[in-house]
Image: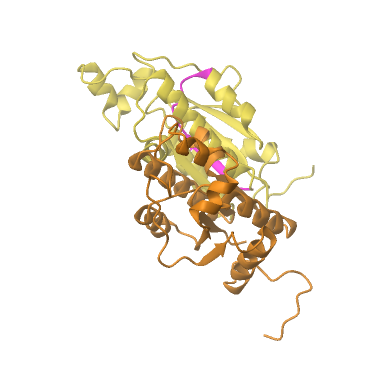
Chain colours: A orange, B yellow
Amino acid sequence: MNGFVLWFTGIPSSGKSTLAAAVAERLARRGLALEILDGDEVRPHLSAGLGFSRHDRDVNVRRVGYVCNLLARNGVIAIAALVSPYRATRDQVRAACQAPFVEVLTACPVAVAAARDPKGLYARQAQGELSGLTGVDDPYEEPLQPDLVCATDQLGVEECAASVLQLLERRRLIAPPPGAGGQG
Amino acid sequence: MNGFVLWFTGIPSSGKSTLAAAVAERLARRGLALEILDGDEVRPHLSAGLGFSRHDRDVNVRRVGYVCNLLARNGVIAIAALVSPYRATRDQVRAACQAPFVEVLTACPVAVAAARDPKGLYARQAQGELSGLTGVDDPYEEPLQPDLVCATDQLGVEECAASVLQLLERRRLIAPPPGAGGQG
């Protein structure tokens, strides 16, 4: 059993958590051990007291990366769903990881994310109740060489999840599904 | 593969890290997946910025417990070596754990720990350079019902490690060593 880190990065409401959950469900159906480290859920456990300054965001991202590494090097699939806005910090996490690391960008235009806005963040920012919203008035640095880009404004969650699974199979991080044919 | 948490608690220099390492070596020799979360080593990763107030210690202990649980519920043996001075906080961590939780007290008189003092903490406290040293001028609340007590002033590390392994075997958390006989 070989663990790895599957890291979803993207602006708020770009579909990280949704896609992470869809991928996790498919992996769990195959009997694989996995953990989802979702930014919003993990923060109270690992980073209570930290805010959203660059420093605090980076500390949080590194912490989640540290935990992902502990899991992955022990054979667990660690799925992170985290805005993780800074390229250098994500690259540090990847470099420190002792297991394969797969970075997936959930890409969608800010306007699309703002129209979804399930947490009301974009609305609050627009009304001046919140500042430092990634992609609006705080930076988001896209990966220059992500392992995969999922255009969540163009593809549904099923299609995106399928493309992630295909990548993992192609990289031999997971076995092909039972019953999959193949001459090679 | 069934994970569990093995939690060493005790005053500074009571032998937590030493015993954790000895137990880990024996478990690793049996091919078991494990992680050691040693207080001193983990702090910079999980709790940079936290100090040694009761609040900060508790947050740190809960964080380590959270990570131990993630590992253990995925089949990894999570070994914590942490002063973790407050009984209620340790009990919270145990209650939140979704895998078996084994609490081991490394017991030794403060005078013995102070004579060991590999990190020089007791000396610094005595010289007034440090305050809030657990067991001296900060509380240590012994577990009321630890799963095991290792009297590290009376037994060597090999004997203590053997008693931990025996407990884990008796609880069926690990299999007996290869070649072990047994009628029952």
Which of the two residues, A43 or A124, is positioned nearer the viewer here?
A124
Inspect this view and state whether residue A155 appears: yes
Which of the two residues, A89 or A183, is positioned nearer the viewer here?
A89
Residue B5, quarter of the rendered image: top right
Residue A95, quarter of the rendered image: bottom left
- The magenta stretch is B75-87
User: Where is B19 relative to B121, above or below?
Assistant: below
Which of the two residues, B173 or A125, is positioned nearer the viewer here?
A125
User: Where is B140 relative to A36, above or below?
Assistant: above
**In which quadrant is the C terminus of chain B drawn?**
top right
Q: Which residue is drawn at 48% across and 39% down?
A: B20
Whole-percent x, y for residue A113 in the image: 54, 50
Residue A159, quarter of the rendered image: bottom right
User: Where is B113 relative to B78, above or below?
Assistant: above
Number of disc labels = 0
Whole-percent x, y for residue B30 in the image: 59, 53
